[in-house]
Amino acid sequence: MRRESPAEIAAIAAQRLERLRASVPSDQSAPAAPLAVPVPHPGRHALHRPPPAPSRVAAWAGRRLPTLAGSARLRLGHLTGLLLVAALVLAVTAWWAVHRGSPTVPVAAPVASPAARTTGGSAPGPSAGASADAAPVALAGSATPSPVAASGTVVVDVAGKVRRPGIVSLPAGSRVVEALRRAGGARPGVDLTSLNLARILIDGEQLLVGVSPGSGAGSAAASGSAPASAPVSATQGASADTTGVASVNLNTATAEGLDELPGVGPVTAQKIIAWRTEHGAFRSVDELLEVDGIGPKTLAELAPRATL
C-alpha cells in the first residue's frame, strides 16, 4: 500500500475544510478569511526529513513487537520448566516422607521408689544396694519400730510442755517438727535444743518436749531417740512390779491417794486434780509436766508408781 505524501495529506485536509465551510449556512457578517494551512513544498531534503509522529510510533511498534513476542515465548518456556522441576521435587519429598521409618524412641522402664518397695513387702535383690541390709531385719521379726508404717502413716505420742499433748497421726516420713506443730507447738519459754526437729518419726515412739537431757527417765525421749524409750519404760514397769508398791491411778485417785506419790504433797495433789478437772483425764504420765510444781526431776521420781 502506497503511503501518501505530506503534500497530498495537506491537500485532502484543505478539500474537507472547504466542504465543511460550504455546508454551514452563511450569515450577514462578512466571511472570515480562510485559515492558511501550511503546505510543505517538496525539496531536495524531503527524503531526509523525519516522518510524522504517528508514523514513527507505528514503525517502532513494528520493530519491537516481534522481539517482545519471542521474549514472551522464551519466558513461558522457562516457567514451564521450573514448574516441572518443582513438581518433581515435591513428588520426591512426598515419597521420602511416606516411606521413611519413624525413629524409635526408647521407653524407660518405671523404677519403683524405695518407699514403694518397702511397703509392697518385696524382698530386695542383690542389686538393691543399701536396702539389702534392711531385709534381714524385716524378715527376722525384730521388735525395732519401723520408720514407715504399713498403712503409710506413723502414730506418735507427743507429751510434755506442748499446747495439745496426745496421740497424733502423720504421713510416713514426717519429721519431729511436724509432730510438734500438730500438737500445737511448744509452750512459751520451752527449750527445744535437745530435740532433733529434723529427725524422721518412727511409728509408735513418744516425743517428750521440755525435758532436759539430764532429767533421768525423760532424757531419752527428750533427745528424740525413739528406740531408747522402750528400755526406759520396761525398766519403770519392772521396778513397780518388783518393789510391790501399789500404783496410783492419776485419773481416779483422790487428793490423799495422789499425796502418796513421791515428790507430791497436798498442794501439788490439789493442782493435779484441778488440771484433771479442766483438761479431762490424763492420756500419758508425761502430761504431769503441765501441772504447776512438777518438773522433770519430780516426774522421774513418781513415774514408776503412776498409772492411767
Image: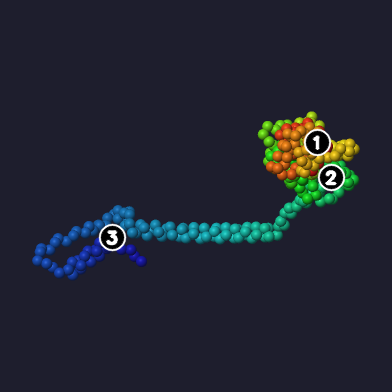
Query: Which residue is depicted at the point 70% across and 42% down?
Result: 277
For the rendered model, the colour scheme is rainbow
Real-space CA distance between mark 1 and mark 3, rounded to the nearest whole angstrom: 156 Å
- Amino acid type, residue under disc 2 in the picture: Ala
The amino acid on which the numbered mark 3 sits, given as a three-letter code, is: Pro
- Ranked by sequence position, the earlier of labels 1 and 3 is 3
Indicate whether 101 appears above or below 241: below
Residue ID for mark 2 = 128
List the residue tagged with mark 1: 260
**Label 1: element kind:** loop
| Residue at numbered disc 3 | 6
Q: Residues within 10 Å of mark 3 (few under 14, many from 20)?
A: some
Any part of residue 225 in sight:
no
- Residue 201 quadrant: top right
Check whether the beta carbons of the residues at disc 1 and disc 2 lie within 8 A of each other: no
User: Which amino acid type corresponds to the residue marked 1 in the rendered image?
Assistant: Glu
Helix, strand, or loop for circle 2?
helix
Q: Nearer the viewer, mark 2 or mark 3?
A: 2
Q: Quadrant of the N terminus?
A: bottom left
State which quadrant residue 39 falls in.
Answer: bottom left
**Which of the marked residues, 2 or 3, is nearer the chain's N terminus?**
3
Quadrant housing the C terminus: top right
Specify whether 250 is left or right of 56.
right
**Residue at the (52%, 60%) spot, across then down:** 76
| Residue 130 point in image, percent of width and height | 84, 41
Mark 1 and mark 3 in contact? Answer it, CB < 8 Å: no
Q: Give the structural element (helix, strand or loop) at label 3.
A: helix
Left or right for 155, reference 36: right
